[in-house]
Amino acid sequence: MKSILENRPELARRVAEVAEVAGYLWQKGWAERNGGNITINVTECIDDDVRALPPLSEPIPFGMTLPRLKGCYFFCKGTNRRMRDLARRPMENGAVIRILDDGASYEIVADEPVRPTSELASHLAMHEQMLAAGNGYRAAIHTHPIDLVAMTHNPAFLEKDVLTHLLWSMIPETRAFCPKGLGIVPYAMPSSVELARATIEQLKEYDVVMWEKHGVCAVGPDVMEAFDQIDVLSKSAQIYLTAKSMGFEPTGTTPEQMDELKRAFNL
């Protein structure tokens, strides 16, 4: 069977980048079993031949109406598929889907009838928000960093921007490379429309959102940029938790040092 990636180098490159990041998530221990999801908007890589492909599934509703996504195409990790398998065989463990004209359902178009992530509503809501913002973002990642999820079990860290300022203060790179900080979504049922809607609200202000006691979502212009933001936040969390395990409260950068960083990086 011919793959949709054949003779489409840009589409193949973007799917390969997803596979690379999927491998990183597994190696870091952030993607147990089938945990985590990745979606990327690949509409600009789609040609008339792909648009003419017959669907591999019946129309499938995803529980929301997102009009900006009408006619868009996404590559999505498959539901119940492992990140480590997505890393090795992306087109067997993911699929390209097409959003139908109702903006509320999709069909699978390639390569195999792999149903996309169970968190599809949240992911597509994030993509709708990115299109509404006009920021050129195309990628969304959901994963389970051990250190960051652990910190959400402390109610003090769930207050607005408390965790943001703590993590910014641990190492200068976090302030530079995650300049919007970290939004917080109180616990909601995984895969629910409620979770999707709460995530949209946070993405109006942040590029990275913590789901309490669950995981992290990040968006960016590509999947590597989205991953990088989670990576730097996780490094800060590790520094904080390591200091605590050594028996002391880390001092963090001072307000004066933080202001210096803001000026240096035009934050």
Image (cartoon, rainbow, N blue to C red):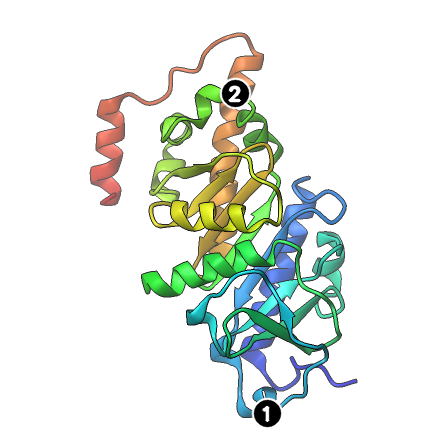
Look at mark 1 in the image and give the residue it sits on: 49
Foreground tag (1 vs 2):
2
The residue shown at (46%, 47%) is 199
Residue type, label 2: Asn
The reply to whether discs 1 and 2 touch (Cβ–Cβ < 8 Å) is: no
Q: Amino acid at mark 1?
A: Asp
Q: Badge 1 local density, few (<14 within 10 Å), some, or many (20+)?
A: few
Query: Is 20 drawn above or below residue 7 in the view shown?
Result: above
Left or right position of 260 against 223: left
Q: CA distance from mark 1 to mark 2?
A: 52 Å
Quick one: 98 or 82, which is closer to the camera?
98
- On the question of residue 81 being in view, the answer is yes
Residue 203 is situated, as x and y percent measured from the top left of the image, at 40, 49
Marker disc for residue 154: 2
Res. 3 image quadrant: bottom right
Task: Please tell me which of labels 1 and 2 falls first in the chain.
Answer: 1
- Residue 127 on image: x %, y %: 46, 62
